[in-house]
Image (cartoon, coloured by chain):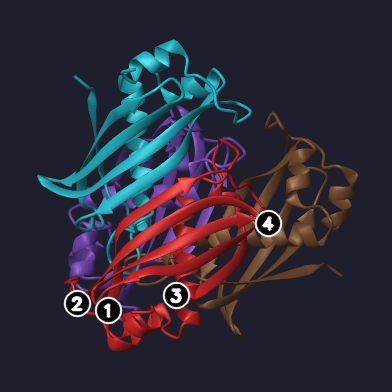
Chain colours: A red, B cyan, C brown, D purple
């Protein structure tokens, strides 16, 4: 079964906009925070990935917004991998306030070397992501 | 034929990240800037939409990243409407550096009243969006 | 003695820039997060301040950067009030990674009503801030 | 006489917050945009500074907020150097909407090499900054 991690945090005031709710471009920033926690928990912190000369660059992003988050809301974000290949992976996110699902998201990634050229993931990274 | 607007700008340093390129969550912010220019050009500035008690909230976002933008790059963003209905619309974006396509995006919107309840767009807004 | 609150968090990747360290405009966002925690701990959450028709707007900001924070650093931020008058207050911040002081900051605030006009702070807010 | 550059732009929706005005942490991002324009105009684009192995890191920042900027406001930012020494400089900013002064700011910088160690500025950079 796939690993799922949970990240808990509050919405910041700076993340809101003049509509009075959290700005939509904040959600990918939260997803990235979830991804950081996921990678640390499965044993390959992203700092190490970069230290070894790899990037997991974004090739695609999608978000479905169902209900708005507001300043100071206590939120939980679940993160899990849905697909892994030797050079790419897809990660899924669910953002909740209590039991209510506020948004879902997906990021597609491509592994590159430090020169931004597509590269095979190191074996331990691939394994940690469930590949 | 559908209206297309073009927005010209440079990537800011604050928009980059430790990979040395523009952070992926910057692109929806740029799309929003393109949307502002679009709405002003077709005669319904978004400031007026809100002044009249409506929001065009995001219900969905997707981005395809093809090649990274970097600090100080001179960029052009084209914005156009692809679908309009009485309460919703879909807007498309293409980001280029010179002739090179760097990213494409799509935002889905729902028109709401000031209480965030779905609402029919005013007739002039609908017409300006091509509906 | 003045109340001091502590906020613990990690630097996000989106908060870094092409220098490889956290972008300087991130620090006021962190200070604001510290301020939110402070106000909640002293019994006047900022959500309540706004719900009662007041804003604590910024009139001034200063930051001294001593050593750079980096992605995924575990940071602690201390927040305390240094001055309070009937309509204004000054808040101080210290950002640390372990024992190392990375930055210090100060924000000056003015209390306004919901029309952005200067206003006396409600008595309980003034008391909570130590005035 | 010292060189002054002017940058013209509109406030973005993403730069606002739930107070309905531009968030205070946006101002240092705008100052940085002014700094980029300044350096390009005086003949040492910041991209070149970095390409030659130097950074102009921030050691200090201060902002005085006089009147709030709002979404879609047409703004002008003036940027000029107030002090230059062999390893440091101070830059001043004035933000206006029409004739109205909205904010003033100051950034202090230290020149470092690519390892973040303090370094003398190259002669042409020093000269371009007025030193």
The earlier-in-sequence mark between 4 and 2 is 4
Above-or-below relation of C63 to B102: below
Residue A54: assigned label: 1
Q: Quadrant of residue A83?
A: bottom left
* Residue B88 visible in the current orientation: yes
- Are the numbered discs 1 and 4 placed on the same chain, yes or no? yes
Mark 4 to mark 3 CA distance (whole Å): 31 Å
Judge whether residue C68 can be spotted in this image: no
Q: Which residue, as the protein is rendered here, is positioned at the far top? A: B123
Please determine whether, in this image, residue B45 is positioned above or below residue D2. above
What whole-number distance in Å separates the C-alpha atoms at marks 4 and 2?
40 Å
Chain letter belonging to callout 3:
C
Residue appearing at x 60%, y 47% in the figure: A69
The quadrant of the image that shows the N terminus of chain B is top left
Residue D130, by quadrant, is: bottom left
Residue highlighted by disc 2? A119
């Amino acid at each position: 079964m796939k690993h799922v991690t949970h990240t808990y945090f509050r919405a910041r005031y700076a993340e809101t906009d003049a509509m009075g709710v959290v700005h939509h471009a904040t959600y990918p920033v939260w997803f990235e925070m979830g991804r950081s926690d996921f990678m640390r928990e499965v044993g390959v912190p992203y700092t190490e990935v970069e230290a070894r000369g790899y990037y997991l660059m974004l090739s695609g992003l999608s978000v479905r917004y169902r209900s708005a988050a507001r300043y100071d809301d206590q939120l939980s974000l679940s993160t899990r991998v849905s697909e892994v290949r030797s050079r790419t992976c897809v990660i899924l996110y669910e953002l909740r306030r209590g039991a209510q699902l506020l948004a879902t998201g997906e990021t597609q990634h491509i592994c590159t070397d430090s020169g931004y050229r597509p590269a095979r993931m190191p074996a331990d990274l691939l394994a940690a992501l469930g590949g």
